[in-house]
Amino acid sequence: MLAQRRESLAYEQHQPEQTLLYQLVEAHYPALIDQLAQQGKSLPDHVYGEFEAYLK
């Protein structure tokens, strides 16, 4: 039984690019940045950094 637990605890690499959230952010984030720039606005640096890190 202990061997079964170890197998079930094995690390499985996440694949966020296959999620709906990732696909939506990837598709619409550039337009958001462009729209904000046209208005003379931008996201706070920490928010911008989080989006960029998420998409990498």
Image (spheres, rainbow, N blue to C red):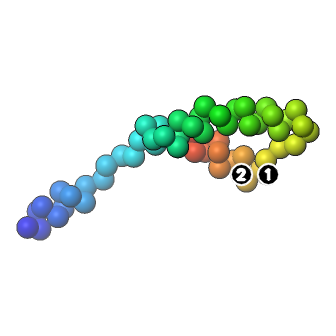
Any part of residue 8 in sight: yes
Q: Position of residue 3 (x, y in %)?
A: 11, 62
Q: Position of residue 38 (x, y in %)?
A: 88, 32
Quadrant of the frame with the N terminus = bottom left
**41 sits to left or right of 15:** right
Q: CA distance from mark 1 to mark 2?
A: 5 Å
For mark 2, give the secondary structure.
helix
Residue extending furthest toward the left: 1
For mark 1, give the secondary structure.
loop
The residue that mark 1 highlights is: 44
Pointers 1 and 2 in contact (CB under 8 A)? Answer: yes
Q: Nearer the viewer, residue 15 or 2?
A: 15
Q: Position of residue 26 (x, y in %)?
A: 59, 34
Query: Which kind of residue does numbered mark 1 sit on?
Result: Pro
Any part of residue 56 in sight: no
Query: Which kind of residue does numbered mark 2 sit on?
Result: Val
Q: Mark number for residue 47?
A: 2
Q: Nearer the viewer, residue 22 or 1?
A: 22
Quadrant of the frame with the C terminus = top right
Q: Quadrant of residue 19?
A: top left
Callout count: 2
Q: Position of residue 45 (x, y in %)?
A: 77, 50
Q: Looking at the image, is 20 positioned above or below residue 27?
A: below
